[in-house]
Amino acid sequence: MRLVESVGLARVLDEHLGILKVARPYQDSDHVLNIALNVLCGGSALQDIEIRRNDVAFLDALGARAIPDPTTAGDFVRRFDEDGVWRFMHLINTVRIGVWQRSGVARGTARVDADGSIVPTTGECKEGMDISFKGIWGYHPLLVSLANTGEPLFIVNRSGNRPSHEGAPHVLDEAITVCRRAGFDDVLLRGDTDFTMSTHLDRWDDDGVRFVLGYDANPTFVDRAENVHPNDYEELVREARRVFSSTRAKKPRIKEEIVKERGYLNKRLISEDTAEFEHKPSKAKKSYRIVVLRKYIVEERGQLTLSEDFRFFFYVTNDRTLTQAQVVAESNARCNQENLIEQLKNGVRALHAPVNTLNANWAYMVIASLAWTLKVWSGLLLPVSPRSREVHEAERATIVRMDFRTFLQRFIMIPAQIVRSGRRTIYRLLAWRPDLPILFRLLDAL
């Protein structure tokens, strides 16, 4: 709550959100924070708010006599229409820009990732639900996030049968505007093959936006890649994820040994190399770089080699300064967004559909994801002193990238006695833990 007050989130919501016509007795920020704080206290559903509203210590910590019950919380998200959800996301991003500028992360390149994810539901009467290409009933929200900090910039709920890229150009344009307002030097868009929308490539290129997007491995492209001169391919050397101070002995690959022993089909990667050529997409007026990643794969069954083949992957980019290896690395780094989706699904449980309309579930997704955003902001606003810069920056990065469950265990679920006395709220910590100095530094900064 000190963090919310410091960044001015509650004030912005009360002044500009405008969901409630009359604020009696609660304001818009009260309803939003009621849901977000329930998630931050380990709640996984709207019904868990009932535990919070009967917890005297929780109410004392908030300085509140009462909070909305689960039914009222459900009624609040049902008040949102499409314009209301967009207005809500823009307000959060307005506050987010202030946090980025205050923490100093709004510099360099803003890497914006986009992807869709299926949100299944077993409900029978949820408006907007449909069956996806995977045969799963539910919704198909689009997530656009900033890879630099792992924050969800926009979540757009859609029917379950909609393609991943539907509505993505508009959302990406909004994300570009947010990053430029924050002060980033440039913007790099990243996405898989579904987001290579050739209609918009020229427009983004003219606007000075860089992109590295996957491209379909259609037969024409595969034929061009096979006809590239062998000398034009160069070996791809991937950077090591970790650097150990001493050489470690490799552990035996138990999984591969079992596959060989039982005669299962085993596909083994032997080598990787890259090349590139120029291509003008059908709906674009300019030509762009196509970087080819060729993987040499051997298929085995037991000790018998069945076949040897090349697999091709393609990436389109307008950045002529990146090496081929850097283009592949940028595209592969986008896969870290899958971790964010996993956290929003099963850690925060934001990508769920607890109510009965598409817009209401959309509003819930955005509000619940605010819990993850507050976790990231607590890391970004952690002060860094010149004397211990490396240590403090490492602590900041740890909190920003930390799993939500780990954050709750280390920084929220701290045994404490909460006493209201003499117009003050006193937190008496009942146990020491190594993370308390970090918590006190954040408290001092706020």
Image (spheres, rainbow, N blue to C red):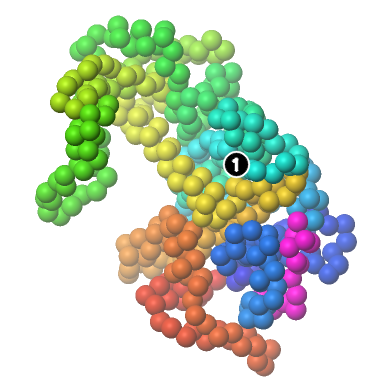
Whether residue 142 appears in this view of the structure is no
Q: Where does the magenta region start and end?
A: 62-74
Relative horizontal placement of residue 387, taking residue 234 as reference (left or right): right
Question: Looking at the figure, which quarter contains the N terminus?
Answer: bottom right
Q: Quadrant of residue 73?
A: bottom right
Q: Residue furthest bottom?
A: 422
Q: Nearer the viewer, residue 35 or 291?
A: 35
Packing grade of label 1 (10 A; few <14, some 14-19, many >=20) is many
Whether residue 351 appears in this view of the structure is yes
Q: Check disc 1 and report the residue beneath it.
A: 119
Question: Image point 47% across, 61% down: which residue?
Answer: 405
Q: Can you give x and y, in whole percent of width and height, for residue 445 in the image?
A: 51, 71
Question: Image point 47% across, 42% down: which residue?
Answer: 337
Q: Helix, strand or loop at disc 1? A: strand
Question: Image point 52% across, 52% down: which residue?
Answer: 346
Relative horizontal placement of residue 388, taking residue 236 as reference (left or right): right
Q: How many marks?
A: 1
Q: Quadrant of residue 368?
A: bottom right
Question: Image point 33% across, 12% down: which residue?
Answer: 225
Q: Amino acid at mark 1?
A: Val
Q: Residue furthest right?
A: 22
Q: Nearer the viewer, residue 33 or 174?
A: 33
Q: Residue furthest front?
A: 262
In this rendering, is residue 266 above or below 217?
Answer: below
Q: Can you give x and y, in whole percent of width and height, for residue 438 in the image?
A: 42, 72
